[in-house]
Amino acid sequence: MEILEVINLNKIYGKGENKVIALKNINLVFEKGKFTSIIGPSGSGKSTLLHCIAGLDNITSGKVIIDGKNISKLKEEELSKFRREKFGFIFQSFNLIPVMSVYDNIVLPVTIDNKKIDKNYIKNILDLLKIKDEINKFPNELSGGQQQRVAIARALVNKPEIIFADEPTGNLDSKTTDDVMNLLKICVDEFEQTLVMITHNNDIAKMADVCIAIQDGNISNVV
């Protein structure tokens, strides 16, 4: 069952001599509950693709359909609300707020929308990610691997349908990378979420159910 469809997506930066075509007529379908990796060399357009389909960047033309809704037509306020409700985000730089405790960082997406915190669900996440003993600490008191676990917990807290991850293991050593990837796969299976991940690591790409290769703004292969 498809959850996300990209139709004739184009992304162009600049005009005239400064015009750069970042994405060219991209057509893709993402299946619900699957792990999809996106690979390609630096400058290939993979981050631009993820940002466009996740509603973090405006597209020049085409459609991004999620749950039957064309998100590229939503106004900014509607899109922001849609992202908070439907998506979770994990980035290479963790993006934790240093003056907030681990727990407050994790529940931030829920408190922004003034929603009730599902304490049992959060407890399950903390147990799964093995960070329940860290919740009163601050990000600078944690290792890189622990910070990424907190970022994953924050991405899961709103029970998103899709998790978008941009090089989430880029700053981690090989052992921690393995741990984080195993946790993400467990999360996909445990909470039936869809994972779309950019990676430069071929071993990680091979773990995915589907691997999309992008080159010069074009889809070069889908396996």
Image (tube, grey):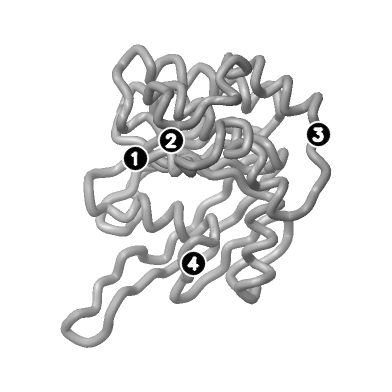
Residue nearest the viewer, comparing 50 with 5: 50
Question: Which numbered disc, 3 or 1, marks the residue that appears first in the sequence?
Answer: 1
- Looking at the rendered image, the disc whose residue lies closer to the viewer, 2 or 1, is 1
- Residue that numbered label 3 is attached to: 118
Residue 41 position, x and y percent, is 23, 44
Are the residues flagged by discs 3 and 4 in contact, CB closer than 8 Å?
no
* Left or right of 111 in this view: 71: left
Q: Secondary structure at mark 3?
A: loop
Is residue 126 placed above or below 45 in the rendered structure? Answer: above
Task: Please tell me the numbered disc located at residue 8.
Answer: 4
Are the residues flagged by discs 3 and 1 in contact, CB closer than 8 Å?
no
Is residue 125 placed above or below 200 in the rendered structure? Answer: above
* Left or right of 85 in this view: 205: left
* Left or right of 121 in this view: 23: left
At label 1, the amino acid type is: Ile
Question: Which numbered disc, 4 or 1, marks the residue that appears first in the sequence?
Answer: 4
Tell me the distance, in whole angstroms, between the alpha carbons under discs 3 and 4.
39 Å
At label 3, the amino acid type is: Asp
Question: Which numbered disc, 2 or 4, marks the residue that appears first in the sequence?
Answer: 4
At label 2, the amino acid type is: Cys
| Mark 4 neighbour class, 10 Å CA radius: few under 14, some 14 to 19, many 20 or more | some
Residue 86 position, x and y percent, is 68, 50
Q: Secondary structure at mark 2?
A: strand
Task: Please tell me the numbered disc located at residue 211.
Answer: 2
Are the residues flagged by discs 2 and 1 in contact, CB closer than 8 Å?
yes
At label 4, the amino acid type is: Asn
Residue 31 position, x and y percent, is 63, 41
* Left or right of 116 in this view: 179: left
- Residue that numbered label 1 is attached to: 39
Question: Which numbered disc, 2 or 3, marks the residue that appears first in the sequence?
Answer: 3
